[in-house]
Amino acid sequence: MKLLNTLQSYLLFVLSRIPFWQVYLYSDVVAWVFTHVISYRRKLVLGNIARAFPEKSERERRAIMHLFYRNLADVMLEVIKLKSMSRDQINKRMKLTNAEVLKQFDEQGRSVILAAGHFSNWEWLGIRVKSETSHQGAAIYKQVASKFYNDYLLGIRNTFEETLMIEHEKTSRSLIRLKNSKILLMVLSDQRPPSTELKYWIPFLGQETPVLPGVEKIANAFDFDVVYFDICRIKRGYYEVTFIPLKLAEEQEQELVLTKRYFEEIEKSVHRQPECYLWSHNRWKYDKNNLN
């Protein structure tokens, strides 16, 4: 196992050092393997796209699928590339269209949740925004099965400045300890809840969808403002990010109002660039009308 980890570390190091023009040559190969060799979750991907876009033809759905596999491969290799990227490279390749939104919260001393979906390259953004604010960066995460890749991803997320990585199960305890700090908390809360937590359902991409109202609960419990970050891919390796305020801390709203607003913004992003969403996730495993 130690030898395997050493070999994997060396391979990832080599991949991180290749120039960007080669990154996308390798990415095309990976995407071809996903599509034509291992058919990575092909049935699930096509099924999810069909559910989200019933008005599209089979040909259009397959076009989205092919672009999705290319985007998935691009993001995988772009994340590896982070290990050798400079701050200037990241800033050049990920433009913030309205960074003043974050700076306003910074000047006010407010803690903020950066909410997003599993859309486009969210890993770059977590590092990009830390150069725009004096907030302590933090992120909620779930451990991946492989200890090697879990540690690798944690290392990448601490590029340039330390990011507090908060395990999902320890969110409340960790935030209580940080109550006197100015936090910029990155949360991706659009994945399927476990079978034991199917309490909340909202419309999403044309169907009733179970959700975890984690963003809303954290914002209300710890007095956080909430901003959605909308990532738009301009071309391979280049992105624009727009920050969309969803809630100011003093606003009091009914249950699920903020959660619905959050998912509405994700849906807008998906309709604009459907290939950038994580279609390989089994988002609609559970049917509200057939839970038994």
Image: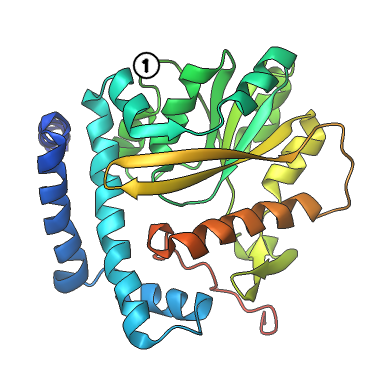
- Say whether residue 207 is left or right of residue 274: right
Q: Quadrant of residue 281?
A: bottom left
Q: Quadrant of residue 174?
A: top right
Give the crowd class for mark 1: few <14, some 14-19, many >=20 residues within 10 Å.
few
In the rendered image, is residue 177 in sight?
A: yes
Which residue in the protein does label 1 denote?
160
Provide residue 186's location: percent of width, then percent of height: 56, 34
Q: Secondary structure at mark 1?
A: loop
Provide residue 58's location: percent of width, then percent of height: 36, 87
Q: Quadrant of residue 221?
A: top right
Mark 1 belongs to which amino acid? Phe
- Relative to 211, say whether 131 is above or below: above
- Relative to 230, say whether 65 is above or below: below
Frontmost residue, 117 versus 106: 106
- Relative to 236, say whether 111 is above or below: above
- Say whether residue 29 is left or right of residue 271: left
Provide residue 85's location: percent of width, then percent of height: 25, 25
The residue positioned 54% from the left and 22% from the top of the image is 137
Provide residue 179's location: percent of width, then percent of height: 74, 19
In the rendered image, is residue 181 in sight?
A: no
Q: How many marks?
A: 1
- Say whether residue 270 is left or right of residue 264: left
Q: Quadrant of the N terminus?
A: top left
